[in-house]
Image: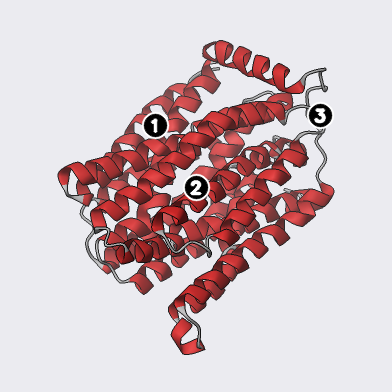
């Protein structure tokens, strides 16, 4: 395997940049929201539910606009500008999270920031086919997630010091949070610049007279013919379920631990451990893809996540959360990276934006189901553990359809 090219490295750097926001979503942001909710006397169960509803609203919106924008960016010369706009919305939204002191307004700004982040990933993922080859895609995709996990720890550790020791430094909690949001927004922007300067769209549809109208037509035709492409269709159904479980765990882990009353500092450090563990394991799975078929490795990850979800049902101690964090780190990067590269291999490269728009619906767009189910079941039963139990069912269904997809030619 040759060393990474400059363009592959620049593409990977965007993972390093945006992963800072992902890590904040999994750690500091829900804890800060818990602080604002507590000031408004919101109960722990309702706090968890409202956080889940905000995540669900975000992904539902992206599920609607994602495929349309994804189809539009397949047009020659459109991918980089639209990617840039989405990234800027995410960066500015992240920086603006420091402004609201009302929990509802805070959630509204969070939704805007996450929409920018999620839509940028549609275009970013589709760039994989422009920056590398099919043979190298598993390794490059895995390297992206791996360096994203470890690189995001740099601004996160700085933010962690500010948030946990603000009083010792002589700052107010509000100022500490403001600095944390600005540092991570700046990191995201700076890591994106090399890709913006060097990326060129190689696979595209020639620009028609009315690009937007033609994009809707192409999307409608693709959706109409999707069942004929049985392998792609079954994979997307499978991905809808198993990655929904993965993202629900990412979105809800710290909120769940916080609602259980676990130590805040312990939760944050445990999530940092997840990032560190994920780095080598993402690379290991990328290298294993040379010896073993990609779909076999994905199946191992789904089985492991099923066990993780079942273990989380009875979680009520700090050490159990730590164990959960390590186990998640072992498979989180692998299942995301290999799913991305596996999908890139089975779709037409000139329609990568369009197909990755659908991929995003069945990925982050689908996570509204898991987060909503956890929130609703937790509120109806009054028991958070029962809500978490729902997640394991998603992995079982996903595994079933994935096996069917791999048997199609």
Q: Are marks 3 and 2 in contact (CB under 8 Å)?
A: no
The quarter of the picture where the C terminus appears is top right
Crowding at mark 2 (Cα within 10 Å: few <14, some 14-19, many 20+): many
Tag in front: 1 or 2: 2
Tag in front: 1 or 3: 3
From this viewpoint, is residue 18 visible? no
Crowding at mark 3 (Cα within 10 Å: few <14, some 14-19, many 20+): some
The residue carrying mark 1 is: 398
Residue 338 shown left or right of residue 188 in the figure: left
The residue carrying mark 2 is: 111
Q: Residue at x 16, y 44 (%)?
A: 381
The residue carrying mark 3 is: 76
Residue 261 position (above or below residue 130): below
**Disc with the residue nearer the chain's start (1 vs 2):** 2
> Which of the pair 393/164 is nearer the observer?
164
Residue 217 position (above or below residue 268): above
């Amino acid at each position: 395997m040759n060393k990474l090219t400059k363009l592959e490295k620049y593409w990977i750097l965007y993972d390093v940049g945006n992963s800072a926001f992902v890590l904040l979503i999994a750690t500091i942001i829900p804890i800060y929201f818990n602080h604002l909710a507590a000031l408004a006397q919101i109960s722990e169960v309702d706090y968890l539910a409202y956080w889940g509803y905000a995540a669900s609203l975000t992904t539902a919106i992206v599920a609607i606009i994602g495929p349309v924008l994804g189809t539009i960016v397949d047009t020659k010369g459109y991918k980089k500008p639209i990617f840039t706009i989405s990234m800027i919305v995410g960066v500015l939204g992240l920086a603006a999270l420091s402004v609201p002191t009302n929990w509802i307004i805070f959630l509204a700004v969070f939704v805007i920031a996450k929409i920018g982040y999620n839509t940028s990933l549609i275009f970013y993922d589709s760039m994989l086919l422009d920056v590398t080859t099919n043979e190298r895609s598993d390794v490059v995709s895995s390297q992206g997630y791996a360096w994203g996990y470890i690189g995001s720890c740099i601004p996160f550790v700085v933010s962690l010091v500010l948030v946990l020791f603000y009083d010792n430094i002589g700052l107010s909690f509000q100022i500490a949070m403001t600095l944390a949001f600005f540092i991570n927004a700046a990191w995201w922007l700076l890591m994106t610049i090399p890709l913006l300067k060097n990326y060129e769209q190689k696979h595209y549809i020639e620009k028609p007279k009315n690009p937007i109208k033609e994009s809707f037509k192409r999307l409608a035709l693709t959706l109409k013919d999707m069942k004929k492409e049985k392998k792609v269709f079954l994979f997307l159904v499978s991905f809808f379920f198993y990655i929904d479980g993965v993202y629900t765990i990412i979105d809800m882990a710290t909120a769940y631990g916080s609602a259980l009353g676990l130590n805040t500092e312990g939760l944050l450090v445990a999530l940092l451990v997840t990032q560190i563990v994920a780095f080598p394991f993402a690379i290991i799975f990328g290298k294993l893809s040379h010896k073993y078929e990609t779909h076999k490795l994905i199946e191992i990850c789904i089985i492991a996540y099923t066990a993780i979800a079942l273990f989380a049902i009875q979680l009520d101690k700090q050490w159990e959360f730590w164990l959960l964090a390590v186990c998640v780190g072992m498979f989180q990067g692998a299942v995301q990276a290999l799913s991305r590269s596996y999908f890139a291999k089975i779709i037409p490269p000139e329609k990568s934006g369009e197909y990755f728009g659908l991929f995003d619906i069945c990925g982050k767009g689908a996570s509204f189901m898991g987060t909503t189910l956890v929130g609703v079941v937790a509120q109806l039963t009054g028991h958070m553990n029962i809500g978490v139990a729902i997640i394991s069912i998603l992995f079982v269904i996903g595994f079933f359809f994935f096996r069917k997809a791999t048997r199609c030619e």
